Amino acid sequence: MKRVLITGAAGFIGSHLCDRFLKEGYHVIGMDNLLTGSMKNIEHLFPDPHFEFHHHDITTYVHVSGDLDYILHFASPASPIDYLKMPIQTLKVGSLGTHHLLGLAKAKKSRILIASTSEVYGDPLIHPQVEEYWGNVNPIGPRGVYDEAKRFMEAITMAYHRYHNVEVRIIRIFNTYGPRMRTEDGRALPAFMAQALRGEGLTVYGDGSQTRSFCYVNDLVEGIYRLLHGDYSLPVNMGNPDEISIMQLAQEIMELVGNKDSFIDYRPLPVDDPKVRQPDISLAKKLFGWEPKVPRHEGLVHTLEYFKKELGK
């Protein structure tokens, strides 16, 4: 039985990855310091003899006994509300945490996949974003702690690949959504759902014309699985190229929830907030035959059912 270490295992995407790899017949070692993750995301896995969980902070050190075939590094605060509250922890998990995991991959001769982000492109000057684009990032702005942590992750990962011959995979994740997102996550989609269910104003920053592209979590997990088992070491974009404005998303969610008390609550645009975001996924299609399958409306319905349970609605 192959063994995989998944960091950030109690988080949104990490917990779905634990599900997938157990389903595929792996022994899964989950690791999380629970800074933003939640045990409720993985408690259903504890009866499985092929799942083990370690409550641990990877910025201190990482030790795993026995053989290890794969490492998936998904530990990090991932929403602006989190990394603005925890800037140093965000930088540390992207730098020290990644360094420790790369050392473990080298020692165990494991293949390692790191979760990078579309935020490496910053407020992009080209659209849609392709992997060859180097980005437009403010390294000392409030969002820089996340952007630069992820850019450093990519740099040190490629250094270990080139200097130590470590097998690496790099995914640049665009906006992802689905069950197990936190209701107080702070990102647009979960914020809108929670606000609409409560009959509150949906917080739209600026005039809502800024765009995002939302990928359902099951589609992303499929892409991650294919990337890990593929043969390509440079970064790969994965997300849904179906681009919409934040205002359109707010309106879709208000209509879906059907709470007549909801309204749009306009707020000033945050510093360095990207104006556009849309992945070019041509490379993922070419290499792995991957593209999203779940239509946005279907994904929103599944996500809404989860949020209703979370909020007791």
Image (spheres, grey):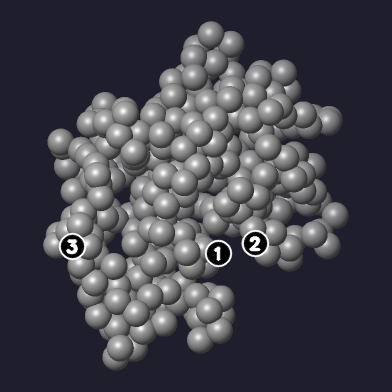
Q: Mark 3 points at which residue?
A: 208
Mark 1–mark 3 CB contact (< 8 Å): no
Q: On residue 41, which mark appears?
A: 2
Around disc 3, counting alpha carbons within 10 Å, would you say few (fewer than 14), some (14 to 19), or many (20 or more)?
Answer: some
- Residue 248 image-quadrant placement: bottom left
x%, y% of residue 305? 50, 79
**First in sequence: mark 1 vs mark 3:** 1
- Camera-side mark, 2 or 3: 3
Identify the residue shown where x is 78% and y is 32%: 64
Disc 1 to disc 3, C-alpha distance? 25 Å
Secondary structure under tag 2 reads: helix
Report the amino acid beneath label 1.
Answer: Arg
Say whether residue 34 is left or right of residue 266.
Answer: right
Mark 1–mark 2 CB contact (< 8 Å): yes
Disc 1 to disc 2, C-alpha distance? 6 Å
Identify the residue shown where x is 20% and y is 67%: 266
x%, y% of residue 78? 46, 47
Q: Farthest residue toward the top?
A: 163
Q: On residue 107, which mark appears?
A: none
Q: On residue 180, which mark appears?
A: 1
Report the amino acid beneath label 3.
Answer: Gly
Instruction: Decide which of 69, 115 is in the foreground and name it.
Output: 115
Report the amino acid beneath label 2.
Answer: Asn
Q: In this view, does 161 lie above or below 177?
A: above
Around disc 2, counting alpha carbons within 10 Å, would you say few (fewer than 14), some (14 to 19), or many (20 or more)?
Answer: many
Q: Is residue 225 visible?
A: yes
**First in sequence: mark 1 vs mark 2:** 2
Q: Can residue 215 be seen in this view?
A: no
x%, y% of residue 127? 17, 42
